[in-house]
Image (cartoon, rainbow, N blue to C red):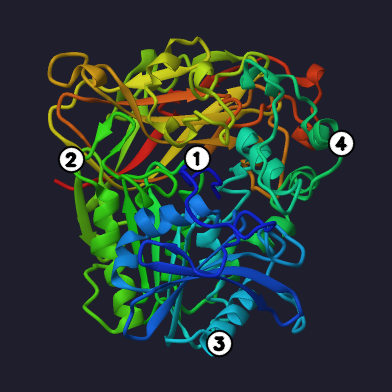
Amino acid sequence: MAISERPALSQSVEVRSGGLSDQVAPGAAIGNYVGEDLMIPMRDGARLHAQVWRPRDSAEDLPILISRSPYGFAPDYVKHLLGSSYKELADDGFIFVLQDIRGRLGSEGEFVNLRPRRTDADGVDESTDTYDTIDWLVSHLPATNGRAAVMGVSYGGWTAAMATIEPHPALKAISSQASPDDMFIGDDFHHNGALRLDYAWGWVTALETDGRTMKPFDFGGTSSVFDWYLEQDPLASLDRRQLGKTVPSWRNFVDHPTYDAFWRSQRTTGNLPTEVAVPNLVVAGWYDQEDFYGPMNIYREQEKGDTNGLNYLVVGPWNHGGWRGDGSHYGPFEFGSDTGKWFRSEVELPWFRYWLKDEGELPLAETLVYQTGSKQWQRSDAWPPATGVVERRLYLGPRGRLSFDPPSATSAEPSTFVSDPNDPVPYRAKGDILPFLSPGSSWSVWQADDQARFAQRDDVLLWQTEPLEEDLVFEGELEAQLFASTTGTDADWVVKLLDIYPADESVEPSLAGRQRMIAGDVFRGRFREGFDNARALEPDAVLSYRIDLHSASHVIRKGHRIGVQIQSSWFPLISRNPQIFLDNILEARAEDFRAQTHSLFHDRLHPSAISLTVRSP
């Protein structure tokens, strides 16, 4: 639910004197578009603020494209939208409505993060607010063709999805882009029950300390955010200590340490209609640092009720919202063309022209997936692919050997390391760890970092294959299946799947020897029997873990190696595990964090492996 996806551009739109930063004066113009400010009434009497931008010289009635967000639409951002991010749409001619959701910036009412679906007929939620907005717009705006769509990225992608719960008859399509689905299992705030510390703290303090601003948290000029977080235990009282008050989402993290009814009620796919009635162009990025799980799972779950063929998926080589800007590269990895511009002009624009203007045809197979490594788009009828693929297992072996051959020995010495939560593994070089909202932060591309540096640590284990004799194509789901023990009563397991580049002249010098992360995630051991059932681990017992690494479409080239790194901390991306069982990890104090010895087993009885879906020969 990124706040930082908007570029800092010079202000060039007239701002109403004395008003909020995202209000525009009547007649304000950006290129061929003129703007006006509106307060749109909701069924409960609250009024939501919106900007309306329309072409000044249109001779035809136009459809309405709505974006709804808690982050505001400041003048520089609107200029960026109409002149760049939405340029292809703007050039074609749409009426853009940019709305602050309830309780944020110019809108009245109370802001509730990921407001739950209403439980009674008199209640309100994002679906009713969208319905009321569309109803008012088609009744009061002049020169519309009576059709509307909702689109957005991140939180805006979530509000687009919510619009389909009780859709207005004029709602003809949506595009839910990088929407979260489940905030405990795989999106912004937790992964597999483990708190994503730096992001969660930065987001909550920016959004929930003042409903009319988005001021980043002041870390007080500290020289190391890594060290700052290391000193902040117990996390349960972090809001009280640092802000002098409690904030709602932080309290939710503390009060709901397992996958209880609170988290389940927020699950996007649990609230959407079981039958897809509104066409949805779901968009995801392979390198999304915030919400990759969400759009992939929304597409997967909606497929179960898509009897009319209205559920589409695009996955590109992008970080969070990267398709809204320059998509020619990700970190050092070049794609040979601007994939973002191509998506906007060849996929997104035809999508909305088809549903809102009755123009053109849909240029899509059901899924359009970019294959990294080969730099090619793949069109198919399903994701993950139902045909042309097979499952293979890469087995962890002794002395860092990774192979497709299963272990033959009945017993073998495990691979061990000491995990010390007081010296956690950083998720990137410490000097690159900046607050994700701070100027100069490269948070959006951290997954492009070379992982080789971490394999030099004693608390990170590395396995790798021999150089491949031919290309190997990952094309579908990935999962780690580990057999492991710990001397403690709790542990985190971090697994990274790598494309290891040759360290020779066959690759460009900047990539030589690079360990490129293709997939990776964390699993909090206490949840091995279920996310709603946290239990202590039995010390020294060999236990099995299944860790979802999601999916990939990637070519490992001939001469490259496949690698796997396993560690037990990833800080401060993920909060530390004290490695002794506590009912609530966020209550852990400094004295609770203890070093423990972890062991990974790889014998015939305990065949730790990575399950891959690969393109069949």
Q: Up-down: is 101 above or below 529?
A: below
Q: CA distance from mark 2 to mark 3?
A: 46 Å
> In front of the other: label 4 or label 1?
4
Name the residue type under label 4. Gly
Quadrant location, the C terminus: top left
Q: CA distance from mark 3 to mark 4?
A: 45 Å
Place residue 172 in its image quadrant: bottom left
Name the residue type under label 3. His
Q: Earlier in the sequence, mark 4 or mark 2?
A: 4
Q: CA distance from mark 4 to mark 1?
A: 38 Å
Name the residue beneath numbered marker 3.
140
Name the residue beneath numbered marker 1.
547
Which residue shows up at 70% across the image and 30% down it?
Answer: 218
> In front of the other: label 3 or label 4?
3
Q: Earlier in the sequence, mark 1 or mark 3?
A: 3
Q: Residues within 10 Å of mark 2 (few under 14, many from 20)?
A: few
Tags 2 and 3 in contact by the CB under 8 Å rule?
A: no
Residue at disc 1, secondary structure: strand
Residue at disc 4, secondary structure: loop
Q: CA distance from mark 2 to mark 1?
A: 33 Å
